[in-house]
Amino acid sequence: MKQIPLGDAHPAFAAPTPRTARRWRAGASLATLALVAGPFAAVPASAAEADAPVFTGTLAVNGAAAVGSTLTLDQTGGTWAPEPESVAYAWYLSADPVLDAADTLVEGAGDTTLDVLPAYLDQYVIGTVAATAGGLTSDPVAAASGVVTVGDLVAGTPTVSGTVKVASKLTARPGTWPEGTSLAYQWKISGTTVATTTTFTPQAAHAGKTLRLVVTGTKAGYAPKTAYSAFSTVAKASFVTTTPKINGTVKVGGLVGATTGLFSPTATLKYQWKANGSSISGATSRTYTIPSRLHGDKLTVTVTGSKAGYTTKSLTSAAAVVSKPFARTSAPTISGTVRVGQTLTANRGTWSPTPSVVSYQWRANGTPIAGATSRTYRLTTKEHGKKISVEIVGRKYAYLPAKRLSSATVTVKWPVGISTPNVTTQPTRYVDTTVGKTVTLKVSATGGGLKYQWQRWTPASGTWTNIGSNSSTYRFTAAPAHELNQFRVVVSNMAGKDTSNRTYLWVRSTQSSPFAAYQWFSLWNYNAVMSESFVYDGYLAAAVAICAAPGYYGTGDLSVQFIGSNGVVYPGAGQEEADHISRGVALDGDGCGEFGAYTEAPRSVWVGGRWRITDRSDGQVYHQYVKYDSLDTTLAGTSARTLAGSGSGASQLGGLIGSSPVVGSRASLTD
């Protein structure tokens, strides 16, 4: 809506004529100015003047003329003629209730309401309205408020955060005040201000007195406002404490003392010793010497701490029974046979008075034996060669525990007839047998209470494993699996053990009981192993690895033939001649090497056939047999010299050479 500015530019403030003159005056109340219509002169008016809207009636400013309030321009007490097309509002600040050119326009105030700001203090607020109709705007009609006064500040509700007691920090919570309000704090103890900060910690002198928080708010344009919290009584503070203890041995004639524990802050302490809960006359020092009359009573000490502003606190220690020593004790004695497996018994001896509880601890060479805490103890092999003693502890209500240690026994011996095992007759050193024969190994030993555990070593495992039953004799039927095995027996009893010498076993195979592929077997001066069979340039072939005894070489000593399923012996072909390896076998530094063997035996006799390896060293004719197992591999274009290292089953032999059993000539082999 259009605002009507003040000043020479507006005809409202020009010299009035009788026809247009209007007069404003103050009524009985300065809160409202009324428009008073005077008589008009009979002067003809122009058409424009006749059509300008005219307000008849009362215009009022409603609302309290105070900072923070809202004023409203109310024109419902009058009417406009003719009916205006639009109206415009404006607000002015004035030193008096009459609108004139000296008044100040309130910028931006073009509505029927106006919020009273602190800048309006001690001034009148004048509201105006002007109407427009037919292109003509009326003179502004005005109404004034009273003089603007300070506003009423809306106070918050103060509260105190924290526990209202001595030494406890309190924080002021002022409540909700209008934005921009400055706050001041007063902590009052019994009406006297003691602090003006946002926090306050009551002191000892404040205990039992009333505390109140006072908050005063100030804001421009408002009267200061003071608000109060509820009254609180300052409680006494509490000590931080721990329970006291009695130091020293609580016995007749003993000097004991009170460990006061913790009193924080430092307090003035008092002591009271009690027997069975009753105060002992005169026993009010920190230390106390226990008289004989208290024997059997329960002794406690009560520590009381006090300090100004703090609640007095008393704490009592745990009770301790007043004891005294046994009148008489005896060292225990030990009865029983001092040998492994025998039971020893501890005898308490004479005590006065008789203890109600006796505990035991057996010792070997002075060291406690774990778990040996009964009156009796059965000696074990661990105690052999050691001296045994026993310690007892006697206990009785109101008597001090007493410890006594026995004298040590003689050295613990083995049971009668038991000594450290000793193998006196060793098993057969070397056994050379054939498949199906019974092998008997036997030892003799001394020591008493003996147990026998036979063990077996195989080239495949490389370790000793337990076999057989608890007997000095071990029998079994020789099989290909026993080839190059070693046997021994461990003889043991509670006194220890002894291990026999080892037996070396050679088993000669037969066509009906051959060795399997990849199993080590012995010849006369060689150990050997064969791969599975495979086809090589139309021949049946196998790879062979050997390890020779020192001074022996495969060339001229060894030959390989194939015995078909029809029983016919087929000589070797190419590298193999009828009775020896013509082209030699290269041996490494360990005396081991590889070569290929193959035969012209027809395919029809392969399945069910056997490879036969013959050792003719030292004038022997020593045969071993290996079962035909097909690898289902065909090789072509490979030289005979590299057959053993080809991509066939022979490639698996490389790792087996390193696991070959240690051998020498049978005539000179030693352990």
Image (cartoon, rainbow, N blue to C red):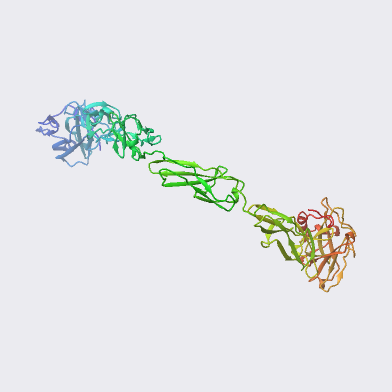
Provide residue 363's location: percent of width, then percent of height: 54, 45
Q: Is 452 drawn above or below residue 168 in the view shown?
A: below
The quadrant in which residue 351 appears is top left
Q: Is residue 648 visible?
A: no
Q: Is residue 302 left or right of residue 17?
A: right
**Residue placed most toward the observer, 76 or 4:** 76
Q: Is residue 464 left or right of residue 622?
A: left
Q: Residue at x 83, y 74 (%)?
A: 566
The residue lying furthest to the bottom in this view is 566
**Residue placed most toward the observer, 176 or 159:** 159
Q: Is 291 drawn above or below residue 622 in the view shown?
A: above
**Residue placed most toward the observer, 510 or 432:** 432
Give the tally of numbered discs: 0
Q: Is 454 drawn above or below residue 315 in the view shown?
A: below
**Residue placed most toward the observer, 308 or 571:** 308
The quadrant in which residue 650 appears is bottom right
